[in-house]
Image: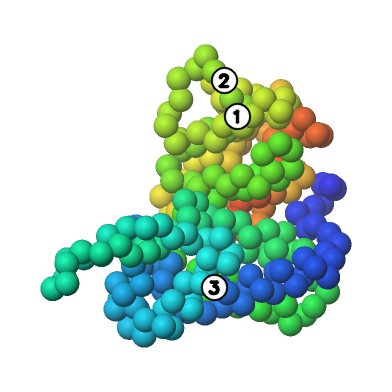
Amino acid sequence: MTDDDDSRTLVLDIDTDDLQELSEYLDVLSSSTRLKILKVIERRPKDVRQISYEIETSYENTKKHLDKLLSIGVVRKEAGLSRPTAKGIHPVWKYSLVPGGLEAITRSLGLFSNLKLTLTDAVLAKKLAGVRETFSGEFAGQPPVVILLGGAEDGRVFALAHDSIDIGRADPGAPGRSGQEIVLGEEYAAVTRVSRPHARLTRRRDGAWLIEDCGSTGGTFVNGTPLDRGTRRELHDGDLVELAKGARGATLVFVVPGGVPVPDAA
């Protein structure tokens, strides 16, 4: 990785099978009806009849859409009980969003588009952009996330749900702040322990996110450029954040769902 402005662009080889899987994944998410289903079951499980009523389509069509969502692993079904009817209560399949399902979709779309992976198929690249825009529109208000790249916890997603979030390596002897920390495993040994945070993310009043180094030994880098201690830098969709350099450090990508630009400083 270089220290110039292009350092966040990753060019990776993608084989034909991976491209085919991506195409199938995007086909499932390209339907606005399926995205509406995800919204309907986001907070509590519902059976097919409840879902079909809320999205205003037939039972049979709803079932076909649910089967598609099941195929990519963002929806699950479990046995439950129907609402009381004239015929009584009976067992039904209830569908719910897999825990972390929306974050998983954000991760998948973000890693392929934000990191500018070279897609050999221009049609597929266009489809990816369209699905990401539609997903963002349906799920407006989802918080930005950071995705851990590489190492033992590769692909782990952290939603930014608080105004101030410390980042560091696990410290068993220190009390946590319950969701207000991004805690990495011991494998990322070059990252400072979270009790004396390596870096800190802060949300500004206008919604922009800033990152600062908290006096770490290994340093914090944004797109290859080191941060001076105590200096805050605004993050934008697709920025790469390195906590120390090398295999023992950690690399995070900052993702705004849908690629909506983070507001500029006033």
| Residue pictured at 62% horizontal, 32% vertical | 184
Residue, disc 3? 68
Between label 2 and label 3, give the one nearer the viewer: 3
Q: Position of residue 92 (x, y in %)?
A: 33, 65
Q: Earlier in the sequence, mark 1 or mark 3?
A: 3
Mark 3 neighbour class, 10 Å CA radius: few under 14, some 14 to 19, many 20 or more = some
The Cα atoms of the two marked residues, 1 and 2, are separated by 9 Å
Marker disc for residue 171: 2
Q: Amino acid at mark 3?
A: Lys
Q: Mark 2 falls on what kind of element?
A: loop
Which color scheme is applied?
A: rainbow
Could you tell me if residue 194 is visible in this image?
Answer: yes
Mark 2 neighbour class, 10 Å CA radius: few under 14, some 14 to 19, many 20 or more: some
- Determine which quarter of the picture holds residue 194: top right
Residue nearest the observer in this picture, 99 or 119: 99
- Residue 113, percent across and down? 68, 65
Badge 1 marks a residue whose secondary structure is strand
Residue type marked 1 = Gly
**Viewed as shown, does residue 80 lie left or right of 25?**
left
**Mark 1 sits on what residue?**
168
Cα–Cα gap, marks 2 and 3: 42 Å
Residue at the far top in the pictured view: 173
Name the amino acid, label 2: Asp
